[in-house]
Image: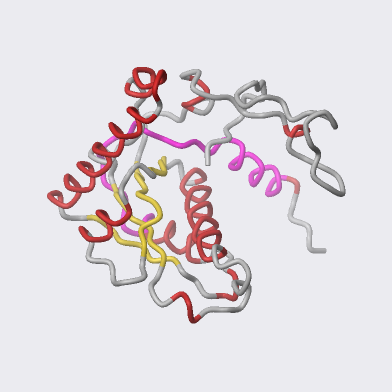
Amino acid sequence: MNRYSDADIAAVYRVIEQRRDMRHFLSDPLDPALLERLLRAAHLGPSVGFMQPWRFIRITDRAVRHQVHGLVEKERRLTAQALGEREDQFMRLKVEGVLECGELLVVALMDRRDGHVFGRRTMPEMDLASVACAIQNLWLAARAEGIGMGWVSLFDPEALGALLRLPSGAAPVAVLCVGHVREFYDEPMLQKERWAERQPLDALVFENRWRHDGDGALSPANAIVDKRDGHG
């Protein structure tokens, strides 16, 4: 009685499999009703202790958007330097669509989170996990609507928080590029660009206790063959 129809179930699995971390966008604006649907989907995300720690900041000022882009570009270059021998390869990747996308959202953790103990007493990071669930809801809803989304994490949280005047204790988690796209990537972009590949599922599923090297062997990172999307 609780099971959805086969068609509905197939649609759920299809949107999960075809979700992509998008970097290439058209500049066409999103219909306001569509944007509201996406944000409502995010707001329906599960949260530990029902604390709902997500806050969404819609960037509508073009000057602010350029400032956000400046912070992302600064961190992109610092990240490239930190990668050492992969610096040139990284700099050739398109890692964001901040200036092109139809909508730019910053997702932040709320302030005064210390007052929420339920489910967080020994694991305070569950507030961040809850925000990630909300972002995933938005991502899947966007894909179902034919809208692309890219999660950008290349920024200094303190600098972005200061730019957006976040209160003490709040923290930015993600810059989300949301908008129309010409087409969705047929596989994850980082996999397509040979930056990394998905690990096989059986290397990541253990039974009863952690499986250490030599017990069945977690294969080295990036030694993968599964071609479905796996970008966070």
Above or below residue 17? Residue 167 is: below
In depth, the one of 151 and 211 nearer the eye is 211
Q: How far across and down, in percent of the image, does residue 92 sit? A: 33, 20
Q: Is residue 143 left or right of residue 174?
A: right
Q: Position of residue 3 (x, y in %)?
A: 78, 57
- Which residues fall within the magenta stretch? 7-35
In-front residue for pair 30/99: 99
> In the rendered view, would you say 91 is above or below 57?
above
Point 48% across, 77% down: residue: 114
The picture quadrant where one finds residue 165 is bottom left
Q: Is residue 146 magenta?
A: no
Q: Residue at x 29, y 57 (%)?
A: 158
**Residue 18 magenta:** yes
- Residue 36 location, x and y as percent? 38, 61
* Colour pattern: secondary structure
Label total for image? 0
Tell me the residue at 31%/58% (across/down).
Answer: 32
Q: In the image, is 229 to the left or to the right of 61?
A: right
Q: Is residue 7 above or below residue 25?
A: below
Quick one: quadrant of the N terminus? Answer: bottom right
| Residue at 17% across, 52% down | 64
Please provide percent x and percent y for residue 172.
Answer: 36, 58
Residue at the extreme left of the image, as rendered:
63
Is 225 left, or right, of 128 in this rendering? right
Give the answer, above or below, for where 43 lies relative to 141: below
